[in-house]
């Protein structure tokens, strides 16, 4: 749009000064070339970093960044090549290049304002600084998370007991957890699902349970979540605390609700257990690690009956 407007403007001058048509178009394209290139580079500088985002945010925003970067780059190339050629071909000499009434009206307001600003430069700078400082303060205090946590009105705990634990022991351990959770202020009800059939797309052994905590809204969710996390930390077995939707999204992307997953492979179960202990000790020393939850640890005898 900027290129076409400047080309049309220079062609209008070309009619008055009898300048060669192609020379006028070339000069007009060169005049706005650097500003257009700078504007495109600024836009690309905003969207290109989105390609480095990981997780769900990366899955959502990376295609957007690629599409915008490709569209802006292609439009930049066309504005310097195809647009001037089309203007020369389809905008005949003597075309009516009068400004629309709206543009003329805006210019009548803009020109006096511009003259006033040029005469009172110090005042304009003070006003600009007065707007810039609060804007910087707001920018520094804005959230930096592309996908803030949703208040789903419920929390989900994923309890994982050792593989050799019996079903009765699993039921008893989770029942005690439910009794503690249902007594918390702000909790409406607690539901549990233990294990999942092997015929489903996401099978789960009987030692893993999903405990759904439904909130009643009388207390802020972060406060309730903090109290639930304190109860989970007191348990002798690992418990992952999340929300139903966040857990499903995380499992769909990486197969686990955790932010980072480490997979171990070993031909021997004993060696695998030793490696698991070493990895846990190494990860526990990493700053920023909140919790480490091993999955699939332990052995479980299995009988296969073939009729």
Image: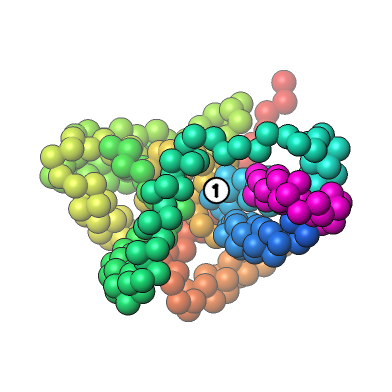
The percent position of residue 176, horizontal first and vertical second, equals 25, 45
Question: In the image, which residues are magenta?
Answer: 1-26
Residue visible at 32% across and 77% down? Answer: 122
Q: How many residues crowd mark 1 within 10 Å: few (<14), some (14–19), many (20+)?
A: some
Left-right relation of 257 to 112 = right
Residue visible at 76% across and 36% down? Answer: 94
Residue nearest the viewer, comparing 49 with 37 = 37
Residue nearest the viewer, comparing 84 with 94 = 94
Residue nearest the viewer, comparing 124 with 60 = 124
Residue visible at 19% across and 47% down? Answer: 220
Residue visible at 71% across and 62% down? Answer: 31
Q: Which residue is identified by label 1?
A: 56
Left-right relation of 200 to 141 = right
Whether residue 249 is visible, yes or no, is yes
Residue nearest the viewer, comparing 67 with 6 = 6
Q: Quadrant of the C terminus?
A: top right
The percent position of residue 157, horizontal first and vertical second, equals 36, 45
SS of the residue at dot 1?
A: helix
The percent position of residue 237, horizontal first and vertical second, equals 38, 56
Q: Quadrant of the N terminus?
A: top right
């Amino acid at each position: 749009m900027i290129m076409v407007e400047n080309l049309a403007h220079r062609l209008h001058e070309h009619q008055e000064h009898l300048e060669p048509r192609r020379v006028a178009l070339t000069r007009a394209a060169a005049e706005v070339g650097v500003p257009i290139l700078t504007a495109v580079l600024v836009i690309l500088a905003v969207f290109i970093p989105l390609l480095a985002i990981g997780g769900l945010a990366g899955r959502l925003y990376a295609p957007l960044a690629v599409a915008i970067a490709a569209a802006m780059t292609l439009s930049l190339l066309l504005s310097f090549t195809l647009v001037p050629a089309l203007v020369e071909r389809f905008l005949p000499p003597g075309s009516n290049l009068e400004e629309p009434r709206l543009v003329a009206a805006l210019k009548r307001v803009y020109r006096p304002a511009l003259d006033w600003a040029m005469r009172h430069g110090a005042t304009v700078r003070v006003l600009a600084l007065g707007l810039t400082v609060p804007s910087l303060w707001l920018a520094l205090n804005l959230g930096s998370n592309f996908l803030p946590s949703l208040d789903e009105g419920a929390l989900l705990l994923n309890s994982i007991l050792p593989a050799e634990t019996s079903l009765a022991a699993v039921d008893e351990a989770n029942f005690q957890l439910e009794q503690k959770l249902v007594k918390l202020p702000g909790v409406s009800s607690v539901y549990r699902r233990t294990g999942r059939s092997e015929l489903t797309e996401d099978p789960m052994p009987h030692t893993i349970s999903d405990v759904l905590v439904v909130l009643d809204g009388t207390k802020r969710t972060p406060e309730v979540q903090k109290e639930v996390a304190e109860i989970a930390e007191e348990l002798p077995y690992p418990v992952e605390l999340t929300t139903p939707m966040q857990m499903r999204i995380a499992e769909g992307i990486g197969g686990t609700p955790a932010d980072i997953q480490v997979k171990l492979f070993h031909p021997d179960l004993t060696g695998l257990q030793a490696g698991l202990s070493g990895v846990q000790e190494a990860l526990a020393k990493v700053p920023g690690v909140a919790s480490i939850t091993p999955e699939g640890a332990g052995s479980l005898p299995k009988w296969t009956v073939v009729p």
